[in-house]
Image (spheres, grey):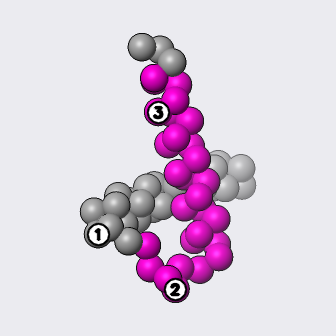
């Protein structure tokens, strides 16, 4: 049960960061007061999205 909870928490955090990413893209800027944890998580999500894009481009 503990592992399921951790996995769900990680997935929820990733979704939260994806929503924030699109919000920042729409706004055109990232707040300067972004916490280190949020910054790291956002960087992780951006890296994941970039890998997805690269994989799709290679499939073309």
Residue 38: image quadrant is bottom right
Task: Judge whether residue 43 is colored magenta.
Answer: yes
Q: Earlier in the sequence, mark 2 or mark 1?
A: 1
- Identify the residue under disc 1: 27
Q: Nearer the viewer, residue 21 or 19?
A: 21
List x then y, in percent, for residue 8: 57, 52
Q: Residues within 10 Å of mark 2 (few under 14, many from 20)?
A: few
Residues marked 3 and 1 touching at CB (< 8 Å): no
Q: Which mark is residue 33?
A: 2
Q: Earlier in the sequence, mark 3 or mark 1?
A: 1
| Magenta extent | 30-57
Residue reaching furthest to the bottom: 33
Residue 56 at x, y = what percent?
A: 46, 23
Cβ atoms under marks 2 and 3 closer than 8 Å: no
Front residue of this view, candidates 15 and 57? 57
Q: Is residue 23 visible?
A: no
First in sequence: mark 2 or mark 3? 2
**Label 1: few (<14), some (14–19) or many (≥20) C-alpha neighbours in 10 Å:** few
> Which label number is shown at residue 53?
3
The image shows residue 20 at horizontal and vertical percentages of 40, 65
């Amino acid at each position: 049960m503990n592992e399921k909870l951790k996995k769900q928490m990680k997935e929820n955090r990733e979704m939260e960061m994806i929503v924030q990413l699109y919000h920042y893209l729409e706004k055109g800027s990232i707040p300067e007061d972004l916490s280190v944890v949020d910054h790291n998580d956002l960087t992780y999500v951006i890296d994941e999205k970039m890998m997805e894009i690269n994989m799709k481009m290679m499939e073309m």
